[in-house]
Image (cartoon, rainbow, N blue to C red):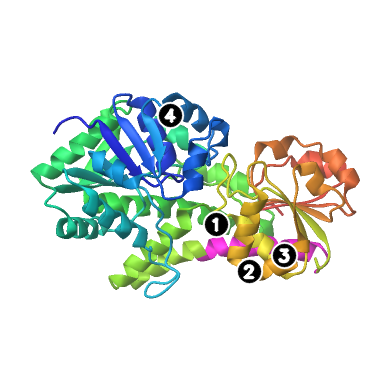
Amino acid sequence: MKKITKICCIGAGYVGGPTMAVIAQKCPSINVTVVDLNDQRIAAWNDENVENIPIYEPGLSQVVKEARGRNLFFSTNVEKAIDEAEMIFISVNTPTKTYGEGKGMAADLKYIEMCARQIAEVSKSNKIIVEKSTLPVRTAEAIKTILDNTGNGVDFQILSNPEFLAEGTAVEDLLNPDRVLIGGEESEKGRLAMEALVDVYANWVPRERILTTNVWSSELSKLTANAFLAQRVSSINAMSAVCEATGADVDEVSRAIGMDSRIGPKFLKSSVGFGGSCFQKDILNLVYIAKSYGLNEVADYWEQVILLNNYQRDRFARNIVKKLFNTVSGKNIAFLGWAFKKDTNDTRESAAIYVADKLLNEQANIIIYDPKVTEAQIMSDLAYLNPEHLNHRERITVVKSAYEACDNVHAIAVLTEWDVFKTLDWRSIYNKMLKPAFVFDGRRILNVEELSSIGFDLTVIGKS
């Protein structure tokens, strides 16, 4: 198979944009076009000021600046990009279904199907189709069925190439991945298609880190990886509740078990809970798949990971109410952080949203500061979870600095582990708060000794 010279990616979101930017940067001989139907998103990717691109990731703006206009292009002309491409990445949203069979668990594949039908309609030459979105097992089979039955006699090879990016370190993960996984059909054409994609990544990734499997194993590996990582977070968060009750310190427990080579130290950081676009969605998808095959005990096992995460968020909110003398009605509570983790502006499934929802239902006033999340996004998140919050807009304030958020409040809740929160002038903050001055550290980032010596009543997850 000849070398790939033209790539199209359908979807300019958190996966498609950064992935294609790095491919373009590392493969100057390949023209990469990212397409999306969202005019505003594409306009933001094309903004003359590269700092205004729609996704905040450390290092991403520099990568885009180097490649954009040279061999990286962002466009709304989907049909033209599909027609010209030899390889097409599908990187559209696969949200959890909110309707019908599988509601609340199964992946909604309507956008994937729309892509497949558009590719089939437009294509006049053979194409390699790469699943980049996180998909249920055997989705590739459905895509191939659509393409083979509605196409124009074109040969389509379907590959699975799941992403293993961590938001906040996505560029580094792309530049130096632990592994690149490529699944394809076990045939001569399938092998050649996989080799074509291997050759793209081999421009910067050592070949020993590029794994090839059958397509079903590749699809399931993505769900399994996220399920295992989320399981570790929920496991240590379960122990954080035990630590608080017994006088143990969850960081000391994490360090002790993490030194066991069979366990290792990663993803053992206790917090108010995991968020992001993948963990919950992928586990619920795995639960649905297990149930659909009659594997109910397997489904129950993985569902408990989600239930524990929900419990941790609820427990954090309940502790705030309890410490504030069992009522937060009319009280001002500062939220430091809204993104689901630092170094990203992504708020999907952020713990802050759910903690805010609980406190607003208790008639608290919340004052929110996040370095990268806009007021419009915060209000959208709250309205999506509970539209009733818009009827009490006076209880929600979004401000431009941490100090403004903490002025004259009853309590502070740290919901995102932004580094800037560690170095705030906490004595100045204390002087402007109502007393007693409560701080709830949901990310275990604050200096306990310093804040306690100032006079704060500090509650830290996993520490009595």
User: What is the magenta segment's predominant secondary structure?
Assistant: helix
Q: Earlier in the sequence, mark 4 or mark 2?
A: 4
- Judging by the rendered image, the residue that carries numbered circle 4 is 68
> Is residue 319 covered in magenta?
yes
Mark whose residue sits in front, 4 or 2:
4
CA gap, disc 4 and disc 2: 39 Å
Residue 349 is labelled as 1
Which amino acid is tagged 3?
Leu
- Position of 77 relative to 47 (above/below): below
- Give coordinates of residue 341: x percent, y percent: 58, 46
CA gap, disc 4 and disc 1: 31 Å
- Judging by the rendered image, the residue that carries numbered circle 2 is 387
Which of the 4 image quarters holds residue 210?
top left
Name the residue located 29 percent from the left edge and 32 percent from the top edge.
201
Which amino acid is tagged 4?
Arg
Residue 359 is labelled as 3
Q: Earlier in the sequence, mark 1 or mark 2?
A: 1
Name the residue located 62 percent from the left edge and 68 percent from the top edge.
386
Helix, strand or loop at label 2? It is helix
- Closest to the observer: 64 or 403? 64
Numbered range of the magenta stretch = 307-326
Within 10 Å of the Cα at label 4, are there few (<14), some (14-19), or many (20+) other Cα atoms? some
- Closest to the observer: 232 or 108? 108
- Closest to the observer: 18 or 51? 51
Which amino acid is tagged 2?
Pro
CA gap, disc 1 and disc 2: 16 Å
Mark whose residue sits in front, 1 or 2:
2
Q: Is residue 96 left or right of residue 409?
A: left
- Give coordinates of residue 440: x percent, y percent: 74, 53
